[in-house]
Amino acid sequence: MTAVYLTIDTEYAAHLPGANGTPGTRAENFDRSIACVTPSGSVGIFHQMDVLDRHGLKAVFFVDPMPALLWGVDAIADIVGPIVARGHDVQLHCHTEWLDHAEGTPLDGLGRRRNLKDFSLDDQRMILAFARDTLVAAGAPSPVAFRAGNYGANDDTLVALAGLGIAYDTSHCPALAGRGDCAISLGPEDLCPLEHRGVTEVPTACLESFRGRLRHGQLTALSLQELIAAVLHARDAGLASLTLVSHSFELLSRDRRRINRVVARRFDRLCAALASMPGVSTATYADAPPTAESLPGAGARLPHDLLRGGMRVLEQAISNALYSRGMRSGAQVLALGTTLLT
């Protein structure tokens, strides 16, 4: 069996109402980041769990407890409680933007920086210990796995995690190696779980795309056909596991006010496909964490397919036109698709 880890980064948004400390606005941030309420319905974690439960699947929710610096532990318990009650996995996530609100806490004076990697090893230990303890105080089991906000970890992060007894990290995104926020000393060839700096590093999935580039295994980055093909390739190549990424708010338009019907349909159909796929099951870190394995890089990623890639570019262009902040005309959609293909 190939274990698919459906991982959902679950987080309040530091750029939405309430994150500046305005009283009484946490509920709006929750509605637009966690529950994802719209006039047409809700598509946040409660909807996502409905879909998962309907298909008999399990997911790993990487929950960011740092907003407790502003709103207290109850703000995190409102997220953790329903996930735990429905039998899904809660693990640790961390966005350091919330350190703006650390006054009067052990983290007071560290200051806001974009990524965890921007702090010293000792400071990272303090931040991660606070985040872990806050998540547990909110009702989660003690976490064994971590993903940095923005994938913004480095080797010091892994050392700090190991010292805290957190045995797994999944901040390395091979498709973004060298051009993203992650500074872990691994490259695009490191595609399978491996032992690194005292933890098991679990890379996120990727596939080959146009011009030899890698495309990361995120719900909004790949088409349904690519997601399914990536899972089938992992199974047929004998991979023990594959990690896919989404977010609590990923089924929304970019302004987080409308349902993105393209992505919402993709999530539902992906879950249906996984539920009926022989040789594949979903897994969690709580019950069956990934194990290190060795497979040549070329065998661990799905090769590029021109038709499949072209259909994804067209689908993404349509989705962006309909659900980005600025609506595009049909001609602009076509131009965008042509640009991406060349």
Image (cartoon, rainbow, N blue to C red):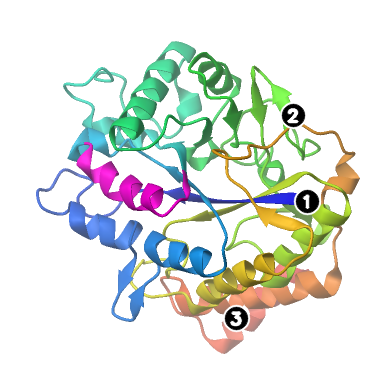
Q: Residue furthest bottom?
A: 330
Q: Which residue is mark 1?
A: 1
Q: What distance separates the C-alpha of mark 1 from that of mark 3?
A: 40 Å
Q: Is 127 a magenta residue?
A: no
Q: Quadrant of the C terminus?
A: bottom right
Q: Which residue is mark 2?
A: 194
Q: Residues within 10 Å of mark 1 (few under 14, many from 20)?
A: some
Above or below for 336 versus 152 = below
- Residue 161 visible: yes
Q: Secondary structure at mark 1?
A: loop
Q: Residues within 10 Å of mark 2 (few under 14, many from 20)?
A: some
What amino acid is labelled 1 in the image?
Met
Magenta stretch, overall SS: helix
Q: What's the magenta region? A: 73-89
Q: What distance separates the C-alpha of mark 2 from that of mark 1?
A: 19 Å
- Residue displayed at 71% across by 42% down: 174
Q: Nearer the viewer, mark 2 or mark 1?
A: 1
Q: Secondary structure at mark 3?
A: helix
Dot placed on the residue nearer the N-terminal end, 1 or 3? 1
Dot placed on the residue nearer the N-terminal end, 2 or 1? 1
Q: Nearer the viewer, residue 334 or 177?
A: 177
Label annotation for residue 333: 3
